Amino acid sequence: MDIKEIQNLIRFVAKSGASEVKLEMDDVKITIRTGSDDTTIVQQVPMQQAPVMHQQVPMQQAVPVQEVPAADTSAEDSKYITIKSPIIGTFYRKPSPDKPVFVEVGTDIKEGDVLCVIEAMKLFNEIESEVSGKIVKVLVDDSSPVEFDQPLFLVDPS
C-alpha cells in the first residue's frame, strides 16, 4: 500500500465519522483511530517485523492545498494559495543532488507539475501541484524535515 492510498483512506475515515478502522493485508496492518481531539493515529506494521510506526495527523485540514487564511498572513499574502505537505518526511527541492531544483520563485506551474520530493520511510514521493499559477515563495529549506499539513509553497493563482 503506497502513501497516497493511505492518505485517501485517512480522508475517507475522516468523512465517514467512524471512530476506528482496521485494515490487514498480506504484509501490512493499518489502524486508523479518530478521537475527540481531532486526530488520526496511523499505525503501519509490516507483518514480518515487530516495530510499530506511529504517525499523528490532524483531521481538520486533510487536503494538501488550502487558501491561506487572511488572519494568518498580511493582506498582501491573502491572495495566495498555500501548498502544504501531504505527508511527514524530508523535503527536497531536487530529484537528486546533481539535478536542478523542480521550481524556483517566479516559476509558472500548472496542475500536475512536480514541485518537490518528500522522503518518507525510504520512499521518495513526488509532490504535484493541484493548482495553476506562479511560485511566489518557497517556505521550506532543502533537506529539511516537514510535518503533515506544513506550508511548503505560496502560489499566486492569477
Image (spheres, helix red, strand yellow):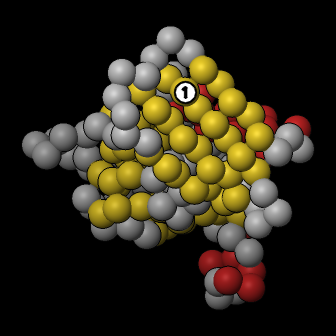
Furthest residue to the front? 50
x and y, in percent, of residue 58 in the image: 67, 59
**Left or right of 105, for residue 7:** right
Q: Nearer the viewer, residue 121 or 96?
A: 121
For the point 50% across and 11% down, which residue is it? 26
User: Vertical placement of 112 versus 92: above or below?
Assistant: above
Disc 1 target residue:
29
Q: Nearer the viewer, residue 28 or 79?
A: 28
Residue 143 coordinates in the image, percent (x, y): 25, 59
Residue drawn at point x = 74 percent, y = 34 percent: 21
Check the image and report above or below for 71 versus 108. below
**Quadrant containing the C terminus in the rendered view:** bottom right
**Is residue 62 visible to us here?**
no
Number of on-image labels: 1
Is residue 33 visible in this depiction of the protein? yes
Residue type (three-letter) at the residue carrying disc 1: Lys
Relative to 158, 42 lies left or right: left
Crowd class of label 1 (few under 14; some 14 to 19; many from 20; radius 10 Å): some
Query: Vertical placement of 91 versus 13: above or below?
Result: below
Which quadrant of the view contains residue 31?
top right
Q: Quadrant of residue 154?
A: bottom right
Q: Position of residue 29 (x, y in %)?
A: 55, 27
